[in-house]
Amino acid sequence: MAELKDLRLTPAASLSPEFLSLCKSVNAKRARTVIDHILKHGVITNEDLSEQYGYDHPPRAIRDVRENGIPLVTHKIKSPKTGRKIGAYTFDDLANVKRGRIGGRKAFSKQFKQLLIDTYGARDAFTNEALDERYLQIDHRIPYEISGDGEELASRDFMLIDASSQRTKSWSCEHCRNFLELHDASICKKCFWASPEAYDHVAMEQKRRLDIVWAGKEVSEYESARKLSAKLGVSLSAYVKQLLRK
């Protein structure tokens, strides 16, 4: 495993004036924090983001930078403090700058959210749970880092999900080979996280997902199933699969 001292650092002094200009054009606070740290130190680690800046989910801050069009290289290194494997990030080549994305995502209007609600209903796209509109977030079907926003906002390119689903999708996408290396939108289109209605894979793995929510009076049914699965010594998902096989 590489160590911090083995990395090719990318501080401000090593960057071209054009790259520096692009970095300085980013105004989003979280992305700005990451950019400024790398400009000063040449690298930033997950430990830096967590301990110095208090970010509980460091990859989200890294994603903010990439969503603003600035390319980063991800390294896996041994922590100088704990010896554990952690992520470290440096700037990538200028040729990989996502020029159409400098400045970040477009802001979504209330009218656009209403269009999505009219199209899909006030439901989480993955669980199909009906939710109060205020709990629903607009999410790109294909990650912004891969497809951007496009020339025009179209309802077919977005979905409505709640915060829990958004975190689960983000984690899965951030660990997918297509997200990390290939950047092929056609692969994303066939993924559960982009098309839960009809898909071929989940983050490039042969899997199928079924997200079920028990609500209101159904909660008692959930508790009964949970207790039965515990008595059998199996997980609730394994118990549900057993029932479906009968």
Image (cartoon, rainbow, N blue to C red):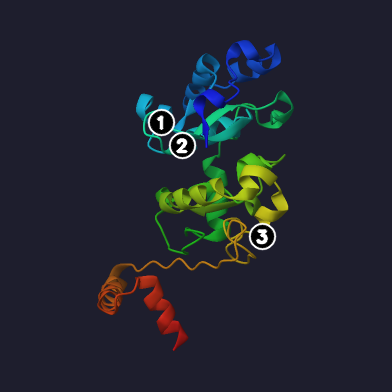
Q: Residues within 10 Å of mark 2 (few under 14, many from 20)?
A: some
Residue type at mark 1 is Glu
Residue drawn at (43%, 78%) of the image: 241
Quick one: SS at disc 1? helix
Nearer the observer: mark 3 or 2; the answer is: 2
Left or right: 182 with respect to 57?
right
Quick one: SS at disc 2? strand
User: Distance of mark 3 from mark 2, alpha carbons?
Assistant: 30 Å
Nearer the observer: mark 1 or 3; the answer is: 1
Residue drawn at (62%, 28%) of the image: 70
Which residue corresponds to mark 1? 47
Which residue corresponds to mark 2? 86
Quick one: SS at disc 3? loop
Q: Residues within 10 Å of mark 3 (few under 14, many from 20)?
A: some
Task: Identify the mark at residue 190; answer none if there is no mark.
Answer: 3
Residue 34: where, in percent of width, then height?
Answer: 50, 25
Indicate whether 41 appears above or below 97. above
Residue drawn at (69%, 26%) of the image: 93
Q: Nearer the viewer, residue 132 or 176?
A: 176
Residue 112: where, in percent of width, then height?
Answer: 57, 45
Indicate whether 234 appears above or below 45. below
Residue type at mark 2 is Ile
The disc, 2 or 1, on the residue closer to the chain's N-terminal end is 1
Q: Residues within 10 Å of mark 1 (few under 14, many from 20)?
A: some
Left or right: 162 with respect to 21?
left
| The C terminus sits in image quarter | bottom left
